[in-house]
Amino acid sequence: MLAYYLDLAVRSLKRSPGLTALMVLTIAFGVSASMTAWSVFRAVSGDPIPWKSAQLYVPQIDMWGPQAQQNNPDSDKGPPDALDYGDAVALMRDHRAKLQSAMYPIGPSVVPADAAKHPITTSGHAVFSEFFPLVDVPFEYGSGWSAADDEHRAPVAVISNKLNAKVFEGANSVGKMLNIDGRDYRVVGVMGEWNPQPVFYDITNTGGFARESEDLFLPFNTAIAANLANNGNTNCNETPDAGFEGLQKSHCIWIAYMVQLDSASAAREYKSYLEGFARTRFPDWAPNVRLRNLPDWLDHQHVVPSDTRVSLLIALGLLIVCLVNTAGLLLAKFLRRSSEIGVRRALGAPRAAIYAQFLTEGAMIGLAGGVIGLLLTGVGVVSVGWVLPRQIANLAHLDFSLLATTLAVSVIASVLAALYPTSRAARVVPAWQLKSN
Amino acid sequence: MLKMTHLAKVYRTELVETYALRDFNIDVKQGEFVAVTGPSGSGKTTFLTIAGLLETFSGGEYHLDGVEVSQLDDNARSRIRNEKIGFIFQAFNLIPDLNVFDNVDVPLRYRGMKADERKRRIMQSLERVGLAARAKHYPAELSGGQQQRVAIARALAGSPRLLLADEPTGNLDTQMARGVMELLEDIHRGGATIVMVTHDPELAARAQRNVHIIDGQVVDIAEEPRFHAHAAQATARHG
């Protein structure tokens, strides 16, 4: 019967090409607007590490005290978003989580061995050895460094495959030396393709999204010893002493911190450890600590930009308007065929057959709208940079799932739009239609 | 074949109740050709739509081919319409988008027949009404008489036990009307039960017997002694 309904739908749609085109375009515009907005929203709201995001936690400690909270009208009374150097180092020393790493952004220059080549400005992070298993960094060659390297401030480095291509022509560079800001570092690992969005391990310093993947990672203690300055945000409640050393001694916050806790009880234990830690270090006020898992942390940091949410809502609103319009057009079209419906009912069509016939017609409009909607969605994804910040817009991309979703949304939306007109069509009383002829 | 006893059809609004049929009794036997006559608004078409299960009724009983139909749901009523009843309408009611072949195909589609069986029946029906050569034509390309013949072919294709015709010649000129009437007589001779509503006394005279309706009731039954007796009994029983 499906072939029969498809044939009837094609005949019906061909009978009024203008009206058909209007409905198809209405659906296509509504669907493409929503799918374009969805592609952006999907890119910024996705879980960057879904297999373990629930086990990754970000600890927060209030090192400034309630007075600072009162002085800051914007404060939500929670602890600051990052740690100061002293707390970060102390937490690392206590080593209470399964895996943990303090980290801060760095931006040193890499000087190629070939003097003819220009120095390369890089971006990266100073981290501890546990960072690599903590966030599941993939390696093309070698691996991360050891805890002993952390302790001994070893001059070692993990570099991206992109930097490896620039400096070592993509060869296995493990064991080779790399000059970073005038000092030699031994390459211990070359990362595979890795550019998580958002940059979940350091939201505070990256703002959530980065256009380029990071070039290198150095040991935290080594970077501190080499005076590699913080390349991210620094937030102080009092002026620190001069220089990088002054920053390390201050209560300015600039260090991101992440831990892995595999169970709820481990998380509870760590939270109570944090409270004890805060009580000991800041005895002048009640401990004010937080321990959020990664999804909660991303939410707390408003990683999904509000304008992408608004765009999505507006686009969905547009889709609903398009659906209502399509429903109106379908209603007019279907009820104009009341006499045909009456005849079909008289000749033995049950209501279900009328539903099937007219919903098939709706689905066909949706399919046509979906195909045109795909083209418009492609145009939309390419040009979304006109309305959204470039680094956000760049994340939107066309892939198979977006294409399939566009077609599915279009067909489902059209069938939904056709439901009311079809139910009216199926309620046509055949006797009245036949009497009135 | 078709038996209605004390049947009533009431149209209700907030203010009034209008009886379209009241204490309506009729018994059509298998193989009969019955003409139902009466003035406009007497309830002829209402009777026909109830007989064809296109409308429900308010009271009484209706047995169609031995089945009491008042309690049947929409699906069961649709199935009976499809399998046991053939309709012929005054306005032909062909579907303009479909050619002759596909119009005749409509009731067979809802019966779930295989394509070759449908094709055989369609061509057989079209040959019977003399329009096999016009199978690919659209309704708009045919004369009124030809359209009504297509409608008759559509009604016959499913081999129904009962043909219901509502003013089948009402939209046709005399010559075409005669042709359609001869076709109906021919179908009746083939063993079909036909109930035909008509205004036309000449047409009614060609039926086996006549049933006259006034104000929603059967008032006069002519021609057939067997039916006279039955109607007399019914009148005596129900006043």
Image (cartoon, coloured by chain):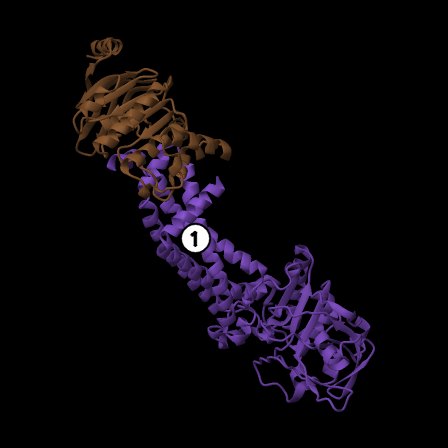
Q: Which chain is purple?
A: A
In the image, B227 versus B140, the foreground residue is B140
Evaluate whether residue B30 shows in this view. yes
**Considering the numbered disc 1 on the image, is that residue within a helix, a strand or a loop?**
helix
Q: Residue at x 71, y 73 (%)?
A: A90
In the image, A126 versus B131, the foreground residue is B131
Location of residue A74 in the rendering, given as x and y in whole percent from the top left corner = 48, 74
Relative to residue B84, is residue B59 drawn left or right? left
Figure disc tally:
1
- Disc 1: host chain: A
Q: Callout 1: 10 Å neighbours few (<14), some, many (20+)?
A: many
Please tell me whether residue B176 is drawn above or below residue B236 in the rendered image: below
Q: Residue at x 50, y 33 (%)?
A: B116
Location of residue A311 in the rendering, given as x and y in whole percent from the top left corner = 45, 66
Residue at the extreme bottom:
A116
Evaluate whether residue B114 shows in this view. no
Residue at the extreme right:
A175
Location of residue A57 in the rendering, given as x and y in whole percent from the top left corner = 64, 64
In the image, B25 versus B57, the foreground residue is B25
Location of residue B48 in the rendering, given as x and y in whole percent from the top left corner = 27, 26
In the image, A423 versus A87, the foreground residue is A423
Q: Read off the residue under disc 1.
A: A365
The amino acid marked with disc number 1 is Ile
| Chain B: drawing colour | brown
Please tell me whether residue B225 is drawn above or below residue A83 in the rendered image: above
Relative to residue B83, is residue B94 drawn left or right? left
Q: Residue at x 31, y 25 (%)?
A: B184
Please tell me whether residue A177 is drawn above or below residue A284 in the rendered image: below
Q: Quadrant of the C terminus of chain A?
A: top left
Quarter of the image for residue A105 reads bottom right
Quarter of the image for residue A162 reads bottom right
